[in-house]
């Protein structure tokens, strides 16, 4: 079993860029201008429980790491950069902390490195169990209408919320719920110490209107980049700025290694 994805060819000698979307998204959400990244080979994956990987399930982060490794191998991807948004960023950070062969760099957008406090974990576990029960048993339109009222999405306009609710309601509620709990922030180790020892270049993008993750960026041993005119989902709200920043990061990092 591997994850389904879309792969795009690139210039010889360039590392693969592997994109991991956020909770309730899918591979298609990375609508980044081809002009910025087109000469890199790219793989856009659907995470377990999502898109064309809806039938794929994982039990925990270790299982997700093993599945990602198997998927990369099946695409014969031997050297790559990981680009992960939110849930995809947490999965990418966990993967990087296992020091996988072939990983050249880590770019994370608006993702949490892990909770420090057991009470916080217990609270998050209960909250994610509540959301999971709603995703399993209620109409997705009603659940996502409440989901996008969470503080992390405070910067969204009503029109942006309506568009996201319509888009995200095409998911399978039961498989979303399973992934939400299997890879809940409550189940993720606190990765801060391991990230500080991260053996590859580590970059962290955040939307200028995403107060929560702008603050988290300051705690991390990563080069932080603010994306203007954007909230939590920066690549959706300002794809040009995200693509240009990715291209700059790659250009400068790969030049340094030549
Ligand atoms: C509510 C919080 O966390 C949830 C929101 C963001 C994460 C995500 O992937 C959402 C993607 C989107 O809807 O655009 C999600 C996750 O990391 O799994 C969280 O469950 C919060 O305040 O951190």
Image (tube, helix red, strand yellow):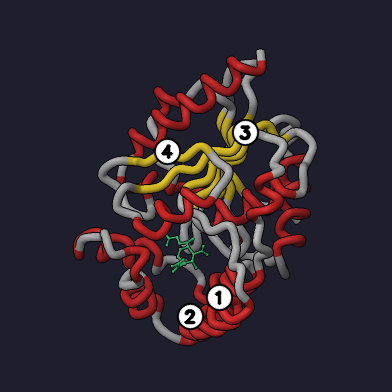
Q: Distance between the residues labelled 4 and 3?
A: 14 Å
Is residue 84 shown left or right of residue 59? left
The quarter in which the C terminus is drawn is: top right
Q: Give SS at disc 2.
A: helix
Task: Name the residue located 25 percent from the left edge and 65 percent from the top edge.
Answer: 162
Give the mark nearest the N terminus, 4 or 1: 1
Disc 2 under 8 Å from ligand 1? The reply is yes
Give the mark nearest the N terminus, 4 or 2: 2
**Residue toward you, 166 or 35:** 35
Do residues under tags 2 and 1 come within 8 Å of each other at their CB atoms? Answer: yes
Which x, y percent locates residue 245?
Answer: 42, 31
Above or below 233: residue 38: above
The quarter in which the N terminus is drawn is: bottom right
Near mark 2 (Cα within 10 A), the count class, few <14, some 14-19 or many ≥20, is some
Which disc number belongs to residue 225?
4
Q: How far apart are marks 3 and 2 (CA)?
A: 35 Å
Which x, y percent locates residue 134?
Answer: 46, 84
Q: Mark 2 points at which residue?
A: 131
Give the mark nearest the N terminus, 4 or 3: 3
Q: Distance between the residues labelled 4 and 1?
A: 31 Å
Do residues under tags 4 and 2 come within 8 Å of each other at their CB atoms? Answer: no
Q: How far apart are marks 3 and 1 (CA)?
A: 33 Å
Near mark 4 (Cα within 10 A), the count class, few <14, some 14-19 or many ≥20, is some
């Amino acid at each position: 079993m591997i994850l389904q994805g879309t792969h795009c060819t690139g210039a010889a000698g360039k590392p693969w860029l592997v994109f991991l979307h956020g909770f309730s998204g899918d591979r298609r959400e990375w609508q980044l201008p081809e002009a910025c990244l087109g000469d890199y080979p790219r793989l856009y994956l659907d995470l377990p429980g999502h898109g064309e990987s809806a039938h794929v399930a994982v039990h925990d982060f270790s299982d997700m790491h093993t599945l990602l490794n198997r998927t990369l191998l099946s695409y014969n991807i031997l050297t790559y950069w990981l680009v992960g948004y939110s849930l995809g960023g947490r999965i990418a950070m966990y993967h990087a902390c296992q020091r996988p062969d072939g990983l050249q760099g880590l770019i994370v957008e608006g993702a949490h490195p892990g909770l420090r406090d057991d009470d916080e974990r217990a609270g998050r576990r209960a909250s994610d169990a509540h959301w999971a029960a709603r995703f399993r048993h209620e109409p997705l339109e009603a659940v996502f209408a409440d989901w996008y009222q969470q503080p992390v999405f405070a910067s969204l306009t009503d029109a942006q919320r309506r568009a996201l609710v319509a888009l995200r309601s095409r998911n399978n509620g039961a498989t979303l719920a399973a992934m939400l709990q299997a890879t809940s922030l409550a189940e993720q180790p606190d990765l801060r110490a391991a990230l500080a020892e991260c053996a590859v270049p580590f970059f962290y993008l955040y939307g200028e209107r995403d107060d929560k993750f702008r603050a988290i960026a300051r705690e991390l041993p990563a080069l932080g980049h603010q994306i203007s005119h954007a909230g939590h989902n920066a690549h959706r709200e300002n794809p040009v700025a995200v693509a240009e920043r990715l291209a700059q990061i790659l250009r400068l990092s790969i030049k340094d290694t030549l």
